[in-house]
Image: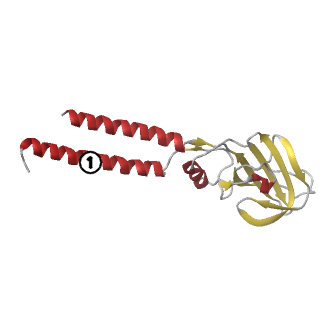
Amino acid sequence: MKSKIFVSLLILSLLISLTDFASKASAIEAPNFPLCTSPQGEVLASYSSGTHGVPGDSTTYLGEDVVFKVNENQVLQCLCTIDGQGIQTNWWQFEALSIDQIETLKSQGWIFVPDGSLWGLKSVPYFAKNAGFACRPPGQPGAGGEVISVGAKGEILGVSLAPTGNIVYILGAFLIGGILILAGVLLRLKTRKHLGIK
């Protein structure tokens, strides 16, 4: 009886610690960003014309590009092409993240950029997320516009991510299953020995 209680307590403590570890390892909240229609922050760069790129997109665009420093960890890039296509890129400089957190963010439409210096930012890792907005082409009065869509890359505002099917839970399930099988075999052997069955 004592061994059953011990095994039950061991399994319960493993479940609690695994759940706590997994939630800390995977849960992360991406920050909110202002919209390009009403940008905020210090202007880091402004190009009234030229050729520009967008992370995660191999197309080059002609048009106006303005980059704003929202805060120490966030940069907002607003590109308005010559045909009136607006592309907002949210740049998020993050602290150390686990592989699970990085994969979770990628599954939510964030693009992992290992070195921001290739994009004119600090030489540190960033996540980037693109969204579309309507704008007037450079040179036309009243440049700007309203956000009309968020495109295929996801929403503009931040998102709270929950752990969903990550490796920690899968390994935890295998570990707990193995412990339960081992406990069952040990209890059976002990019961057979106690009853005198060989």
Residue found 7% across the figure and 48% down from its top? 197
Q: Which residue is mark 1?
A: 182
Number of numbered tags placed on the structure image = 1
Outermost residue, bottom side: 59
Question: 40 or 98: nearer the eye?
Answer: 98
From the viewer's perspective, tell me whether residue 99 is left or right of residue 22. right
* 84 lies above or below 92: below
In this view of the protein, can residue 118 be seen by the observer? yes
Q: Examine the image and state in which quarter residue 187 appears.
A: top left
Q: Examine the image and state in which quarter residue 64 appears.
A: bottom right
Residue found 75% across the figure and 52% down from its top? 116
Residue 125: image x %, image y %? 70, 50
* 84 lies above or below 122: below
Residue 157: image x %, image y %? 67, 45
Residue 52: image x %, image y %? 83, 61
In this view of the protein, can residue 165 be seen by the observer? no
From the viewer's perspective, tell me whether residue 182 is left or right of residue 193. right
Quadrant (top left, top right, bottom left, bottom right) of the N terminus: top left
Disc 1 residue type?
A: Leu
Residue found 71% across the figure and 55% down from its top? 130
Question: 163 or 2: nearer the eye?
Answer: 2
Question: 179 or 165: nearer the eye?
Answer: 179
Residue found 69% across the figure and 41% down from its top? 32
Judged from the image, the secondary structure of the residue bearing numbered disc 1 is helix
For label 1, count other residues whose C-alpha is less than 10 Å away and answer few (under 14), some (14-19) or many (20+). few
Residue 11: image x %, image y %? 32, 39
From the viewer's perspective, tell me whether residue 53 is left or right of residue 174. right
From the viewer's perspective, tell me whether residue 85 is left or right of residue 114. right
Outermost residue, left side: 196
